Amino acid sequence: MPNRRLVNPAGLHPAPGFSHVAIAEGTTVVHVAGQVALDEGFSIVGGDDLEAQTEAAMRNVGVVLAAAGASWDDVVRRTIYTLHPTEYEAITAAIDRVTGGAEHPAQTIVGVTGLAVPGLLIEIECTAVLA
């Protein structure tokens, strides 16, 4: 049984690529630090391509989730920091490719002027809940 219940209440705008509410129903909370498009050698993956960097960052999130014993269906909250916040359709498409189309949790996209390593375009953090 999933550890979350996703809700999109009537009376709110459609939620493209996210859910308005994620209700956590487990007991163990996993906080995933912001993941970026860096490989094990600390090189940027994807160059200046936002979708490629998003996929790389999400693959890194997946590695962290697996290490914690969690899956995409356990994620209740996702925060995305990006230099290109209006490109949410490209970001969502890349996320869908990595997650296999798993339902989207509650999410916020925040526009930033820069990230910790020059050349990075996106950073993704999330919270998961386990039974």
Image: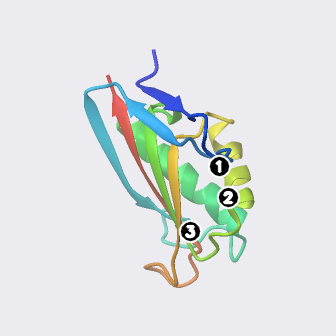
35 shown above or below 49: above
Q: Mark 2 points at which residue?
A: 91
Extreme top residue here? Answer: 1
Counting residues from the N terminus, which is met first, the one under dot 3 or under dot 2? 2
Q: Nearer the viewer, residue 8 or 90?
A: 8
Q: Which residue shows up at 62% across the image and 67% down it?
A: 45
Quadrant including the N terminus: top left
Cα gap from disc 2 to disc 1, whole angstroms: 6 Å
Q: Name the residue under label 1.
A: 95
Amino acid type of the residue that numbered disc 3 sits on in the rendered structure = Ile
Left-right relation of 86 to 111: right
Task: From the top left corner, tell me how far across and down residue 50 is, in percent.
Answer: 69, 68
43 shown above or below 27: below
Secondary structure at numbered mark 2: helix
Task: From the top left corner, tell me how far across and down residue 118 is, in percent.
Answer: 52, 85
Task: From the top left corner, tell me how far across and down residue 22 is, in percent.
Answer: 45, 36
Extreme front residue here? Answer: 11
Task: From the top left corner, tell me how far across and down residue 56 is, in percent.
Answer: 60, 58
Q: In which quarter of the image is residue 55?
A: bottom right
Quadrant including the C terminus: top left
Amino acid type of the residue that numbered disc 1 sits on in the rendered structure = Ile
Secondary structure at numbered mark 3: strand
Q: Name the residue under label 3.
A: 122
Residues tagged 2 and 1 counted as in contact (Cβ below 8 A): yes
Q: Which residue shows up at 55% across the image and 58% down it?
A: 57
